Amino acid sequence: MSSKHKHSDKQKRIAEILDQVSLLASEYGKLTGKPLGVTGEVGEYKVSCLLDLTLTPPRQPGHDATGVGGRKYEIKSRITGKPIKRSKRTSKINIDDQWDAALLCCLDDDLQPICIYEADREAVLQALLKPGSKARNERHTLSISQFISIGRCVWPVD
């Protein structure tokens, strides 16, 4: 069996596992009203597949994935529901890490991607460091609406 064939089998199995995890996490959330805590992993994997990115090894500081030309991405995923609840916030964005752009994957209640937005590092830093908000300035989080306003939709592409 070729190395390429093994890789595609591995990718297929990972996708199957994450589909099962998504179903269980969705059911858990509906029963308890609490997230299961797998949104980040599911979102990162789905973003990497949809945008043809290469995920970095687990727990590597700096960025989550690389793309064409070595562009480094920080990936944030959030269950926003459908329609998107724009008042929800991203998880912490580490401003000291080395990444070129941030990606926000909005997921429905079943952890399926609704849309993916990309914002360049400079725009994210300007939004995070803008005076006035403790959540932005100290916790380094943005509301979904703020991220969307500084980014551009990269999936689905019309």
Image (cartoon, rainbow, N blue to C red):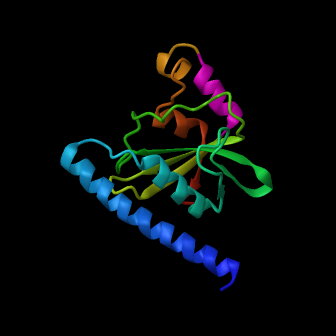
Residue at image position (53%, 57%) is 45
Q: Quadrant of residue 18?
A: bottom left
Q: Quadrant of residue 59?
A: top right
Q: Position of residue 88 (x, y in %)?
A: 40, 35
Q: Position of residue 80 (x, y in %)?
A: 38, 45
Asked if residue 65 is among those painted magenta in the image, a careful observer would answer no
Asked if residue 128 is among those painted magenta in the image, a careful observer would answer yes
Q: Note whether residue 153 is visible.
A: yes
Left or right: where 19 falls relative to 55: left
Q: Nearer the viewer, residue 145 or 47?
A: 47
Vertical side of 26 occupied by 73: above or below: above
Left or right: where 33 falls relative to 132: left
In the rendered image, the quadrant that contains the N terminus is bottom right
Q: Main secondary structure of the magenta part?
A: helix
Residue at image position (55%, 18%) is 137
In the rendered image, the quadrant that contains the C terminus is bottom right
Left or right: where 140 falls relative to 110: right
Residue at image position (37%, 41%) is 85
Vertical side of 80 occupied by 20: above or below: below
As drawn, which residue projects farthest toward the bottom?
A: 1
Vertical side of 41 occupied by 131: above or below: above
Q: Note whether residue 158 is visible.
A: no
As drawn, which residue projects farthest toward the right?
A: 69
Vertical side of 128 occupied by 59: above or below: below
Per the rendered image, the range of residues in magenta is 120-130
Q: Position of residue 50 (x, y in %)?
A: 57, 62
Q: Nearer the viewer, residue 150 or 29?
A: 29
Q: Position of residue 128 (x, y in %)?
A: 59, 24
